[in-house]
Amino acid sequence: MTQSHTTDVLIVGAGPVGLSAAAELRRHGVRCRLIDRLPARLPYAKAVGIQPRTLEIWDRMGLARAAVEAAVPLRGQLMYVNGREQARIDLELPPEVPYGFAALPQYETERLLEEYVAGLGTVIERGTELLSFSQDADGVTARLRTASGADEELRTRYLIGCDGAHSTVRKGLGLSYEGGAFPEEFMLADVEADLDLPHGYSVRSTHRAADGSTDDLLVCIPLPGTGRYRMSMMVPPELSEGAGGEAPSARGDDVAHGLEGGRAPELSHIQAVVDRLAPSPATVSRMRWSSVFRISHRIVDRYSDGRVFVAGDAAHIHPPTGAQGMNTGIQDACNLAWKLALVVQGAAGPALLASYDAERRPVGEEVVGRTVRHATQGIETDPADPRTVQLREAQLLVGYRDGPLAGSQYGPTDAPQPGDRAPDCAGLTAPVPTYPLRLLDILRGRTGHVVLLYATDATDATELSEAAEAAGVGGAPLVVTEGSLDAPNYPYSGASSHVIAVLAREVAATTRDTSAIPGYVDAAGEFARLYRPDGSTGFVVRPDGQLGARFPLAVTAAALSDYLSVLSG
């Protein structure tokens, strides 16, 4: 057995979640190894829905443009029951939200992320499997089996399990995975069909028996390509588990979730369901892939144990209703990665890592509960108003106000507060660009926290220099010497952070040329409308796009000291 060099983080599983963890860690300058037991990327269109919040995260990374060019828009869903249209759901979001809903096959999502990570110097170690691991106070020792069949012992500071519903990492930690399984089996297929549907609309067509139960189902989600759909439907008797093939128990795993081997539906199986349930006659063809799959709903009792973490399906599984799973896992990875980066770089204490479970497990619990309700009762039965339902499905309402990192509220309680998503806004101008910018344009590519200092009038604008001096100036990395801000262990010493001024229209002319920090004018008043500052106000935007702090501009130094002391533990 060979002894390998130590790395900072070992990531097990190179699906969208593991790749997202690697992307964020590498963006923050953290060394990591990314392994996957599979020899190649699977060509399956499993998770296909891309939520607007995920696209915002990808925009910060600089990946959104490639994603939107490869994806197709999802504009709504047509719902049929027993051949009659029952509802038409149009996916509409407020105009300030920069991205809509999209569809992209999972293997394309993985390709884009894989290329991104490779550009940062990390490649997937294919055919490499985690056999076992142990941890102590100083790190994790992992035993790997490489593609050549050789065993390798790796010493790493931290381990992240992104290895799916049958996670080796989760089992190695002994985490509970409570929940249950749905009795139904389903088919998935990636096909072309000449369905007569509005562009960008999916279809959910069901047949209800006399007792009101659903005994037949067809869901068609558009994919890139002419007339291409990912279809899901119930399994016919000849393909059911009792008719032969590999059952979930054959894997030695009691988690009945995911694709089942040995029972691939044929085109005729798909056509039969389309004939019964499609809203108009249609022919399916060019089947690229098909499978039988099962659905469970489970969540772990904790997202971490010591130096080992789980994310994505390794932590939570649930029905695919609303395309929440992969997107939730990507946000798991992004939430964890920036915190790990600070700790690895010595810019924050290990206590910061406890906030990963505290912030993300409540989100996982909510998603599991909601998707189970929607799968059994229908999303149309959700009691929330349609606007709230769509914002929640878009994952734009995910927040951590009750989490350990959320400091004191300031200003209106219904305004964005610490823990909430930092809204994007349009209409920001600067001296050189001749076109208005979005806040996402300003945040793009930045890896650390961003401090936004908003001045509402000329008198308050004079405080910008003092506030900027407290926070760091010129958009350079924040390096605060010992004793500054009354925080001797200032956790961002050497870490990449940025300070930006946002000026109200009324004060822009008097301060634009005197401010020592990059300045943008809220020319359209959108920043003021969406952030609702209470006078001149400062904001801290976390690396994952959530607000970290909100405070009066006059107390910037003290407010940043308070926030950073929370990060330092």
Image (cartoon, rainbow, N blue to C red):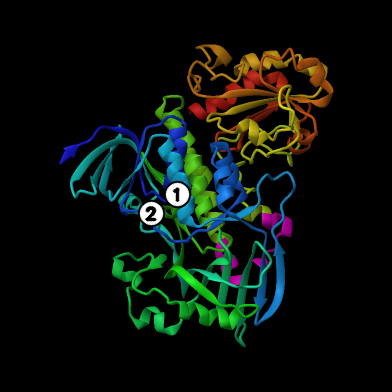
Q: Earlier in the sequence, mark 2 or mark 1?
A: 2
- Residue 512, picture quadrant: top right
The residue identified by callout 2 is 41
Identify whether 213 is placed above or below 399: below
- Residue 74, picture quadrant: bottom right
Q: Residue 301, percent across and down?
A: 43, 52
Return the residue nearer the eye: 22 or 300.
22
Residue 372 magenta: yes
Q: Amino acid at mark 2?
A: Arg
Is there CB contact under 8 Å for labels 2 and 1?
yes
Identify whether 290 is placed above or below 48: below
Return the residue nearer the eye: 43 or 29.
43
Residue 111's disc is: 1
Residue 261's disc is: none
303 sits left or right of 40 in the view: right
Q: Residue 447, percent across and down?
A: 53, 30
What's the magenta region?
A: 371-390
